[in-house]
């Protein structure tokens, strides 16, 4: 049995480390509206579930006065705990200790818990609050980041990796989050950039604030680096718990099973899509009209809003939803929405989550800006991601499915398992107006009354192609269904896809148009 003296010594040592960067630094942290690293972990994990490791790790740096510096825990807290009653591995950088900067031993603590997460098949949650590579440790801190990036890549698709950015994060401190599956940011607290305002001032002579450069809004609305935005740290932790209630703990875990409730009556699926085909509507209402309890957890809500992605459940099981959003840019596919959809499809596929796709789009966005931004390469990611995915893939065409958009949005040709269409669906190479103007141009121009002939020709095109029956006659669509049948048809399709097995050609890996 340990003597009283030894126990007192342990307590004293623990107390010393728990002081973090000291009272003054903690006060500075609190004044900025930030919790301390330890408070964050306690708040996020289930009550009393946190077990900390490597409390007594010390740095070994000797240059630039580091030999005289004691950095408690070397600026990072690591351990295990539970969320929603299930085990997770976690680390939180402590900004009060040398700005949470990443030295060699700091990195070793993180990589140790990352290896643990992989071995134990638990999600890894990283709370980042760091000035990046510890400048005094030179290449040793760069080596530390390299080791983290390597593990982020190794873990990718095996266990969920969740990053929370809760401070000014620079350099390596943002590249690790960028390699993970979901990034959470908080208003006024999160800042992400590769090179900070001071470097920009020196190199480019430009003045810019951290907020304007890479604040939470910038990352959620402009860059798409962040997946979830919250007003406070508390709200952010609730979002993380909610995310974890949908996703499997690893790629070998069965789907999460939640309680089943019928969708709410206020989402009447037969009344959401306006009769006037030019009128937009919110496709999220369609998703809520089919999911259990009308529950939908949207991801990257404010970026590339012309496509909607997120999780909901059908018959208690998690599904990934991908839907064109007619409310924004008529739901077109463009550079950003293609990236957004493609990455999410790959996430669902890696973690065995079936994908439900709702289609209503006029195609890819035309224009010089999009072409020059690489819409060919980015748009191809959607084709690649759907074609490569082997999870159950179910499509419902609600209204327009034109051109490349028809093919890209999980068509039969990319191996959708089931394709359904509503009676109002229009499947064609392009919209009737554009099509008639091109293929009947001469007839229209030469007519006595060009406008009358143009209208006739548009109608002819509508009669021929602007319906789901041409595609249904070829078997490209499995069934034309009434809107009110959608949930029951989806429930059945998911049920019969439960044992889906498909083979892919043997290869090391494909080469997606990254
Ligand atoms: C060592 C650091 C540090 C770093 C901050 N600190 N960043 N120490 N290495 N990288 C220390 C400060 O010296 C200070 O110590 C304490 O942390 C708090 O920092 P402040 O500057 O007082 O805080 P604040 O004003 O809030 O500014 C935060 C900051 C700024 C924006 C993060 O500190 C900053 O710009 N840091 C450098 C960022 C950077 O360029 N990092 C390298 C990126 S390159 P004291 O003792 O005074 O409290 C990189 C390589 C990997 O990461 C790239 C991979 C692709």
Image (cartoon, grey):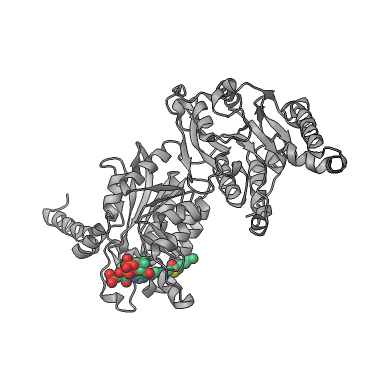
Residue 48 position in % (x across, y down): 25, 42
| Residue 173 visible within the image | no
Query: Which quarter is ligand 1 in?
Result: bottom left
Of residues 365 and 200, the one drawn nearer to the viewer in this rendering: 365
Q: Quick check: 510 above or below 241?
A: below
Of residues 369 and 202, the one drawn nearer to the viewer in this rendering: 369
User: What residue is shown at x 67% (from left), y 49% (from top)?
Assistant: 380
Of residues 365 and 102, the one drawn nearer to the viewer in this rendering: 365
Q: Residue furthest bottom?
A: 64
| Residue 431 visible within the image | yes
The C terminus appears in which quarter of the rendering?
Answer: bottom right
Residue 69 position in % (x across, y down): 26, 72
User: What residue is shown at x 52% (from left), y 26% (from top)?
Assistant: 290
Give left or right: position of 234 versus 514.
Answer: left
User: What residue is shown at x 24% (from left), y 57% (from top)?
Assistant: 30
Q: Quick check: 343 above or below 143?
A: above
């Amino acid at each position: 049995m340990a003597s009283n003296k030894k126990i007192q010594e342990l307590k004293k040592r623990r107390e010393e480390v728990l002081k973090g960067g000291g009272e003054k630094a903690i006060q500075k942290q609190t004044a900025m509206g930030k919790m301390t690293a330890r408070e964050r972990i306690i708040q996020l994990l289930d009550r009393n579930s946190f077990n900390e490791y490597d409390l007594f790790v010390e740095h070994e740096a000797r240059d630039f006065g580091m030999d005289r510096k004691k950095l408690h825990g070397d600026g990072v807290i690591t351990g295990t705990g539970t969320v929603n009653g299930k085990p997770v591995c976690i680390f939180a950088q402590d900004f009060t200790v040398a700005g949470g900067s990443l030295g060699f031993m700091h990195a070793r603590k993180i990589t140790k818990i990352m290896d643990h997460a992989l071995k134990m098949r638990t999600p890894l949650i990283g709370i980042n609050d760091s000035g990046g590579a510890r400048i005094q440790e030179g290449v040793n801190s760069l080596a530390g980041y390299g080791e983290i990036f390597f593990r982020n890549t190794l873990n990718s698709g095996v266990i969920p990796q969740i990053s929370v950015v809760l401070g000014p994060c620079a350099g390596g401190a943002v590249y690790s989050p960028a390699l993970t599956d979901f990034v959470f940011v908080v208003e006024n607290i999160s800042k992400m950039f590769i090179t900070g305002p001071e470097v920009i001032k020196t190199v480019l002579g430009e003045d810019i604030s951290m907020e304007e450069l890479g604040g939470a809004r910038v990352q959620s609305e402009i860059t798409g680096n962040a997946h979830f935005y919250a007003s406070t740290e508390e709200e952010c932790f609730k979002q993380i718990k909610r995310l974890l209630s949908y996703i499997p703990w690893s790629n070998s875990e069965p789907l999460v099973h939640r309680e089943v409730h019928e969708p709410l009556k206020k989402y009447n699926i037969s009344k959401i899509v306006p009769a006037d085909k030019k009128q937009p509507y919110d496709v999220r209402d369609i998703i809520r009209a089919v999911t259990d309890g009308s529950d939908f957890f949207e991801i990257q809500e404010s970026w590339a809003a012309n496509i909607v992605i997120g999780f909901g459940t059908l018959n208690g099981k998690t599904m990934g939803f991908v839907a064109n959003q007619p409310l924004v840019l008529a739901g077109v596919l463009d550079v950003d929405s293609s990236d957004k959809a493609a990455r999410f499809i790959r996430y669902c596929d890696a973690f065995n989550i079936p994908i439900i796709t709702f289609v209503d789009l006029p195609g890819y966005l035309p224009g010089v800006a999009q072409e020059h931004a690489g819409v060919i390469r980015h748009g191809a990611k959607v084709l690649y991601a759907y074609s490569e995915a082997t999870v159950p893939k179910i499509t419902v065409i609600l209204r327009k499915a034109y051109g490349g958009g028809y093919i890209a949005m999980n068509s039969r040709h990319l191996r959708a398992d089931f394709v359904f269409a509503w009676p109002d669906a229009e499947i064609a190479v392009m919209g009737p107006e554009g099509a008639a103007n091109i293929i009947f141009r001469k007839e229209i121009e030469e007519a006595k009354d060009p406008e009358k002939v143009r209208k006739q020709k548009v109608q002819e095109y509508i009669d021929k192609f602007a319906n789901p029956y041409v595609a249904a006659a070829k078997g490209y669509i499995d069934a034309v269904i009434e809107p009110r049948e959608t949930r029951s048809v989806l429930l059945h399709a998911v049920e019969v896809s439960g044992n889906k097995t498909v083979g892919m050609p043997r290869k090391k890996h494909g080469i997606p148009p990254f």
